[in-house]
Amino acid sequence: MVFLRTTVSALVLMTTLLAGCAMFSPAAPKDGELALPADYKSWPKFLSAVQRPDVKQIREIYMNPAARQATAAGGFPNGTVFVMENFAARARADGTLETGPDGKLIKGELLRIGVMGKGEGWGRDVPEALRNGNWVYAQWMPNGQKAPDDLNGCRACHLPVANKDFVHRYDEHFASR
């Protein structure tokens, strides 16, 4: 009988605690708090082999399934996550960039992995001048450690494309669908 009362009391307490937790939504992540999704390489590509000779890089950009719901007119929905692999472009001894038979840059080592995520109320802690709607950012090293990068650089880079939901190559993506 004592066991039954203790068990019932424990269940009532757990139910009360869980109901209370349901009233509080988890805090919105801040820049640097987005995890690197373990399965991102299984996601659809947003764009592939993006050529950036200006910064001596090649980029592979993945988007999670939620991003597939986007439309050119409506932008990307909350829950969208992009992962961008930044590879060094291979260079010759004289510093010129190597290209393949197709004229495209050749990938070298993986430099960084960027994560860009969108959610309701995300980014509110960012100064107004750098706010990118509901987007937040994180940077990771190839070994899985957080990169020491200043994420305001990400924000400043995406700010000029506010009319494209802060997403570079927005038009290119939707034109290819």
Image (cartoon, rainbow, N blue to C red):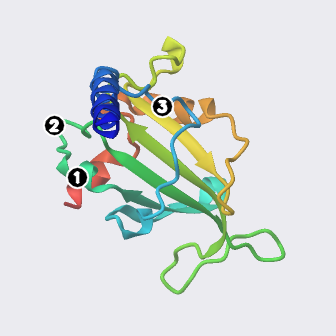
Q: Position of residue 147 (x, y in %)?
A: 69, 47
- Looking at the rendered structure, the secondary structure element under dot 3 is loop
Q: Residues within 10 Å of mark 3 (few under 14, many from 20)?
A: many
Given residues 143 and 75, the one toward you in this image is 143
Quarter in which the N terminus is drawn: top left
Tell me the kind of residue under disc 1: Phe
The circle drawn on residue 174 is 1
Q: For the residues marked 2 and 1, what is the alpha-carbon distance in whole angstroms?
A: 10 Å
Tell me the kind of residue under disc 2: Ala
Tell me the kind of residue under disc 3: Pro
Q: How many marks?
A: 3
Q: Residues within 10 Å of mark 1 (few under 14, many from 20)?
A: few
Q: Position of residue 53 (x, y in %)?
A: 60, 60
Q: For the point 67% across and 47% down, which residue is it? A: 146
Residue where numbered disc 3 is placed: 29
In the rendered image, the residue lying farthest to the front is 1
In the rendered image, the residue lying farthest to the right is 93
- Looking at the rendered structure, the secondary structure element under dot 2 is loop
Q: Position of residue 32 (x, y in %)?
A: 59, 37
Q: For the residues marked 3 and 1, what is the alpha-carbon distance in whole angstroms?
A: 28 Å
Res. 86 image quadrant: bottom right
Residue where numbered disc 2 is placed: 73
59 shown above or below 66:
below
Given residues 103 and 165, the one toward you in this image is 165
In the rendered image, the residue lying farthest to the bottom is 101
Q: For the point 69% across and 53% down, which residue is it? A: 145
Q: For the point 50% across and 55% down, which residue is it? A: 84
- Looking at the rendered structure, the secondary structure element under dot 1 is helix
Q: Nearer the viewer, mark 2 or mark 3?
A: 3
First in residue order: circle 2 vs circle 1: 2
